[in-house]
Image (tube, rainbow, N blue to C red):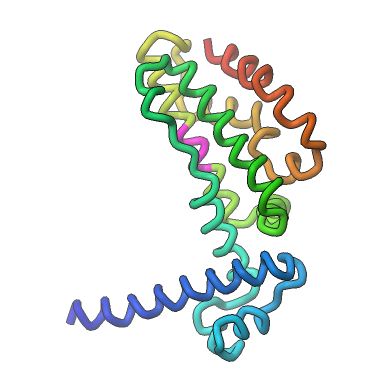
Amino acid sequence: MESRVIARIQPRADERSRIVEAATAACRQYGPSKTNVADIARLLGKSPANVYKGFPSKAAILDAVAASFFETRFCFTLSAESGQASATERLKETVLGQHRLMLQARDNDAQMFSLMALAAEDNWPSFKRYLKRLEAAVGELILAGIAAEEFAQAKIEVAASCFCASISVLWDPRIIEALPSSRCDMSAHELVSFAVSGLR
């Protein structure tokens, strides 16, 4: 019985994955605003009706594309060398590393970055999950800083939320998309240092 249930679920998951891949290709080719379900279906060699079996709407497809992009392209990990660094330095490296990923996407994958900005503008579930993931990572580093007596005692969730709000300009694709590239990295170090000082 269980194997039959898994067999039914697996093809559906594989089909959804193929739709997301085709939709990603369509977004890069036409841009998110001009991509439609017919484009995605054509890339799959299927009818639009088959695409709608995997997702209820174009909006749901684009949100899944955004979710995949947030999870694969905006998932900064600390370097092995940073394991010996202080919690303060690891927090700074995480924030600035995430910011660099944003700048790289903006400069090298403009159509997909436009989709990220759209996800942020309309507060899609994919963008909410992205922010929640970043806040959780920051919370872990703040907890490590408190344990090491680098940061003052605080409620982790509140401290992480406030910290992320104070540096959101570095992680929000809407803001990054609008800023000239010459301004983005110039003040990032100063902003992060200022935000970290509030944890002490």
Q: Position of residue 87 (x, y in %)?
A: 43, 18
Residue 135 lies within the magenta run: yes
**Which residue: 56% across, 43% down?**
131
Whether residue 81 is situated above or below residue 118 in the rendered picture: above
**Which residue: 55% across, 82% down?**
44
> Is the N terminus in the top left, top right, bottom left or bottom right quadrant?
bottom left
Q: Characterize the magenta stretch by its predominant secondary structure.
A: helix
Q: Nearer the viewer, residue 63 or 36?
A: 36
Locate residue 101: give its quadrant.
top right
**Which residue: 52% across, 10% down?**
200
Whether residue 181 is situated above or below residue 200 in the rendered picture: below
Q: Position of residue 42 (x, y in %)?
A: 62, 85
Q: Position of residue 15 (x, y in %)?
A: 44, 78
**Which residue: 50% across, 79% down?**
54
Whether residue 162 is situated above or below residue 134 in the rendered picture: above
Q: Taking 39 as reference, is 82 left or right?
A: left
The image shows a total of numbered marks equal to 0
Q: Taking 33 as reference, is 69 left or right?
A: left
Q: Position of residue 72 (x, y in %)?
A: 49, 52
Residue 133 lies within the magenta run: yes
Q: Which residues are magenta?
A: 132-137
Locate residue 114: give its quadrant.
bottom right
Whether residue 95 is situated above or below residue 26 in the rendered picture: above
Q: Taking 84 as reference, is 38 left or right?
A: right
Please identify the residue farthest to the front as the structure is shown: 108
